[in-house]
Image (spheres, rainbow, N blue to C red):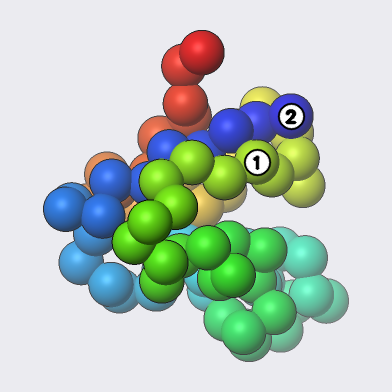
Amino acid sequence: MARIKIDHSKCCECCLCEIVCSLQYNENTVNPKRSRIAVFFRKPDIDIIGCDHCGDEPQCIKACLSEALALAVE
């Protein structure tokens, strides 16, 4: 399972990660509220989430323009 680290200090709140996730997993529909990352995105006390919907190459990380998302190294 991929573990995604969120650096809230780098996040510009563009929501591109939510858009990409919703496009990928909700029948090509842009709906950030249905994004897999949306639940954790706006909670500053959570900095690592587990998500296995993209395997080892999470699309949200690729889409992040501010490099606020990264694979967490254990």
71 and 19: which one is in front?
Answer: 71
Which residue is disc 1 drawn over? 50
Q: Is residue 9 left or right of residue 45?
A: left
Amino acid of disc 2 = Met
Residue at screen point 26% across, 55% down: 8
Circle 1: element type: strand
In this orientation, does residue 62 appear?
A: no
Amino acid of disc 1 = Gly
Q: Quadrant of the N terminus?
A: top right
Q: Position of residue 22 (x, y in %)?
A: 66, 72
Residue at screen point 28% across, 46% down: 7
Marking on residue 64: none
Dot 2 alpha-carbon crowd within 10 angstroms: few under 14, some 14 to 19, many 20 or more: few
Circle 2: element type: loop
Tell me which numbered mark, 1 or 2, is placed earlier along the sequence: 2
Which residue is disc 2 drawn over? 1
Q: Position of residue 62 (x, y in %)?
A: 45, 44
Alpha carbon of mark 1 to alpha carbon of mark 2: how far? 7 Å
